[in-house]
Image (cartoon, rainbow, N blue to C red):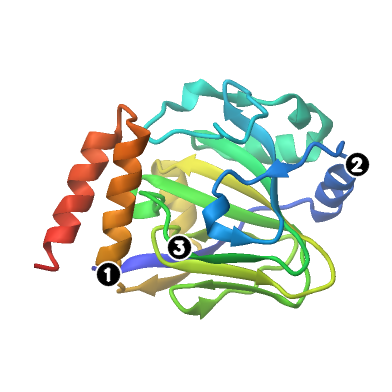
Amino acid sequence: MKVIRVARLDFPIAAAQFEAEVAALPERWIPHFQKVHYEGGWTVLSLRSLQGNLDEKFPFALGDEPGNYSATPLLALCPAIGRFLDSLQCPVLSARLLNLRSGSVIKPHQDVELAFEKGEARLHIPIFTNSEVEFVIDEERVVMAPGSCWYINANLTHRVANRGATDRIHLVVDCVVDDWLRAQFARAEISYSAQRRDPKELRQMIARLREMNLPAAPAIIAQLEEELAQFG
């Protein structure tokens, strides 16, 4: 089945204001909770999360309602970013700043049910980056410049390496796909993939979901098992 790999969305980004706001934030960065997925430094500041919690251990939950997400105290220090989030006319779930430190690597991995076709879209807005950052999804390198906004299909295998001398900081926003967002994608520059997910990765996702024991997990596990059955 053909799915969207990446899409460049035509959203206005106040790049200089985003940079100034992020540079002025207090040093509250904490390690990303998926420690098995990276080497080096990958740290987080949450701007919107479940119950406005700054603790990255619980930034979001599968199947949770948009109304359970709210601003953390740090979002009040970022008015331009706040205006951008308000301009998104679809339900916004989490919004985080993710900092991949110089010399650090995010290993190849797939996320769980994070795809436009599954009803949830992850947007990346680069704030600080450099030419030595290698973001590869489904074996296609994607070069993201400050001032741009990108959707990535996190269900597909992706990896990142920051080989530059400076940190790479993205604003990462998870949204619910609705009619408004579909209309934005209809005008976007889109790259498609026909890749099927690796059976080993599917089994690992199912195991992780069973360990998490979330209310939405059984329905997602059933979908993944159906996908796994296609491999025979």
Q: Are there few (<14), some (14-19), or many (20+) residues within 10 Å of tag 3?
A: some
- Residue 209 position by quadrant: top left
Rendered view: 45 above or below 9 = above
**Residue at image location 36% in from the left, 73% down from the top:** 193
> Does label 1 or label 3 sit earlier along the sequence?
3
The three-letter amino acid code for the residue at tag 1 is Arg
Q: Earlier in the sequence, mark 1 or mark 2?
A: 2
- Residue closest to the eye, 188 or 42: 42
Tell me the mark number nearer the camera, choosing from 1 and 3: 3
User: Which of the labelled discs sits on residue 196, or is there none?
Assistant: 1
Q: Is residue 182 left or right of residue 106?
A: left
Please tell me which of labels 2 and 3 falls first in the chain: 2
Q: Which residue is mark 3?
A: 109
Labelled disc at residue 14 = none
Please indicate whether residue 114 sits to the left or right of residue 15 in the image: left
Circle 2 packing at 10 Å, graded few (<14), some (14-19), many (20+), is few
The residue beneath circle 2 is 24
Q: In the depicted view, which residue is nearer to us: 95 or 88?
A: 95
Residue 179 falls left or right of residue 189:
left
- CA distance for labels 2 and 3: 32 Å
Three-letter amino acid code at disc 3? His
Q: Which element type, helix, strand or loop, lies under badge 1?
A: loop
- Callout 2–callout 3 Cβ contact below 8 Å: no
* Quadrant where the N terminus is found in the figure: bottom left
Judged by depth in the image, the label closer to the viewer, 2 or 3, is: 3
Could you tell me how far apart the alpha carbons at marks 1 and 3 are, in whole angstroms? 14 Å
